[in-house]
Amino acid sequence: NAGVMQNPRHLVRRRGQEARLRCSPMKGHSHVYWYRQLPEEGLKFMVYLQKENIIDESGMPKERFSAEFPKEGPSILRIQQVVRGDSAAYFCASSPPYGGPTTDTQYFGPGTRLTVL
Amino acid sequence: SQQGEEDPQALSIQEGENATMNCSYKTSINNLQWYRQNSGRGLVHLILIRSNEREKHSGRLRVTLDTSKKSSSLLITASRAADTASYFCATEAARQLTFGSGTQLTVLP
């Protein structure tokens, strides 16, 4: 059973370009979470999604950032018109549906390191 | 300070010694989780302790939780050089994990 997969692992963009980060959850997992980690800091929650629904986006910046988790395919975190301050590691996590013994455990992917020039 | 604050920020020990890291938090939680992150890598889930539990073991790891003091500790016994990593506690509420800034553990061979 493959773990959470993220791609690309490294992404370089110039200011003003768009960044698209992809996350495929673990098989059987229906909940996806995105976190951002700035250098020398812990992870900060951004958004929580289930298939075709955004459940909690309280950690998402109000502008330029959006996330989706379509019925088919990976979850996408999209950053429009990137700025230098967007440079960070973006981690995706997934968890199983409610009711199982590991419902509360979030399994993390390897992250995408975004560098904005 | 933020939710899930680890202490100390950095810890350096000799192989074979025990390492203890502490975590304090502010609000009510469903559970508290500890993760490890090797430099430049993703997070590895170590252990989850629920709010109604006081102590939990997993291999060389021992986690305690004191909800009255809003604190948790992670003990790694008989440390190895491979334990060198950053360790984060994360509190969970409403499916949202709130991380501290981590403890950087260095285990010297």
Image (cartoon, coloured by chain):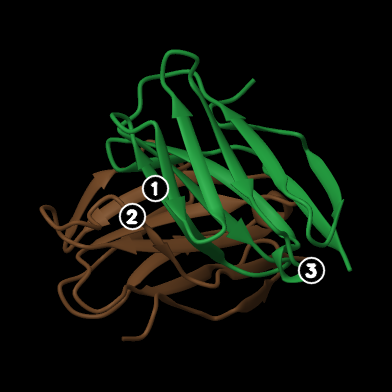
Chain colours: A brown, B green
Same chain for labels 2 and 1? Say yes or no. Answer: no
| Residue identified by numbered label 2 | A105
Choose between B83 and A26: the one closer to the eye.
Answer: B83
Task: Specify whether B108 is left or right of A21.
Answer: right
| Residue identified by numbered label 1 | B48
**Horizontal and vertical percent position of residue B2:** 59, 25
Instruction: Write the residue at 19% across / 65% down.
Output: A30
Same chain for labels 3 and 2? Say yes or no. Answer: no
Task: Specify whether B24 is left or right of B20.
Answer: left
Viewport quadrant of the N terminus of chain B:
top right
Instruction: Write the residue at 78% across / 53% down.
Output: B17
**Horizontal and vertical percent position of residue B92:** 37, 38
Q: Which mark is residue B39?
A: none
The residue mark sitting in front, 3 or 2, is 3
Viewport quadrant of the C terminus of chain B:
bottom right
Task: Specify whether A33 is left or right of B73.
Answer: left
Which comes sooner in the sequence, label 3 or label 1? Answer: 1
Marked residue chain, label 3: B
Can residue A40 be seen from the camera position used here?
no
The answer to whether mark 2 and mark 1 are in CB contact below 8 A is yes
**In the current view of this chain or complex, which residue is farthest to the top?**
B68
| Residue identified by numbered label 3 | B81
The residue mark sitting in front, 3 or 1, is 3
Task: Specify whether A46 is left or right of B5.
Answer: left
Answer with the quarter of the image where residue A113 lies. bottom right
Instruction: Write the residue at 32% across / 30% down.
Output: B51
Q: From the viewer's perspective, is residue A49 above or below residue B50?
A: below
